[in-house]
Image: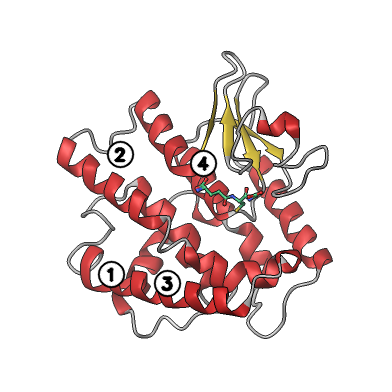
Amino acid sequence: MSSISSLILYGVPFSQPVRAVMWLLLNKRMPFEMVLINPGSTGDNGSRNPAFLAKNPGGTIPTIEEPDSGFALGEAHAIMCYLCNKHGWDDLYPSNFQARARVDWYLNYHHRNVRDASLGLVAPKIRKDLNIPQVTQDAAKATLTSALNALENGWLAETAFITGEQLTIADFAAYVEIGQLKPGFTNVWDFSPHPKVQAWLARMEHIEGHDDVHVVLAELGDISSQAPSMETIKAANKSALRALKAHP
Ligand SMILES: N[C@@H](CCC(=O)N[C@@H](CS)C(=O)NCC(=O)O)C(=O)O
């Protein structure tokens, strides 16, 4: 996965926005090195440690760094757009202004809508330390339901992918949130009211890089009836990193 001067991706495979960036890089077979950063921790490898805050003042993963120039960038969507711009990956981030604007539209929409999948359903079980109040979880689930309705009746109503017939980075961004909920992974959501979303999820499974990016969730398995132990979470992360290293 890496060479000495390759791009550095700070993160952990458990992080949804980190997985979006990983997927883009694996899909494009772009060498990178993942440097493990513990989200929320002020410790040595923590995202709230002063050394990390100097790279990303928001203290979040993913963050990338280019070793040659020292250029650092945070926010998964900004990172994916930058990488597509830099490498000319117009297939995933179209150069046509209107097509690109539709991708940007979804990427902006995502943050306070689809992203609530993690807040309402995954973080309460994986990040028990956050003590996310029930009322917050319920509000996040309601937001997710509205977002899935918007995907079902709007974005995915007529097309194979979110902004049209072509896969774009909008699909990576959306899938890392929505896909994590399905049977085979955490199994914490009933998708039966959303058949078009289900069909899109199935389509996304065939996109290059899907399996390697999602080792962490395949290993974690069903968490619908019981929250996983810290050992299970750590083991899943380790398997995910092994898979990443083995990627051509
Ligand atoms: N909008 C950001 C969200 C990043 C984010 O929420 N990352 C979490 C991990 S999934 C994080 O770093 N949390 C640590 C913290 O906020 O202290 C993005 O898309 O990159």
* Residue occupied by mark 1: 150
Q: Give the residue type that dot 3 points to.
A: Leu
Image depth: mark 4 or mark 1 in front: 1
Mark 2–mark 3 Cα distance, whole angstroms, equals: 25 Å
Nearer-N-terminus badge (3/1): 3
Element at badge 2?
Answer: loop
Q: Give the residue type that dot 4 points to.
A: Leu
Q: Give the residue type that dot 2 points to.
A: Tyr
Binning the other alpha carbons within 10 Å of mark 2 as few (below 14), some (14 to 19) or many (20 upward) gives many
**Which quarter of the picture shows residue 201?**
bottom left
Q: From the top left corner, tell me how far across and down residue 199 is, in percent.
A: 33, 72
Q: Are marks 4 and 1 in contact (CB under 8 Å)?
A: no
> Which scheme is used to colour this image of the protein?
secondary structure
Q: Are marks 3 and 4 in contact (CB under 8 Å)?
A: no
Q: Is residue 221 above or below residue 17?
A: below
**Residue 184 shows in this picture:** no
Q: Is residue 150 above or below residue 111?
A: below
Element at badge 4?
Answer: helix
Q: Is residue 173 above or below residue 230?
A: above
Mark 2–mark 1 Cα distance, whole angstroms, equals: 22 Å
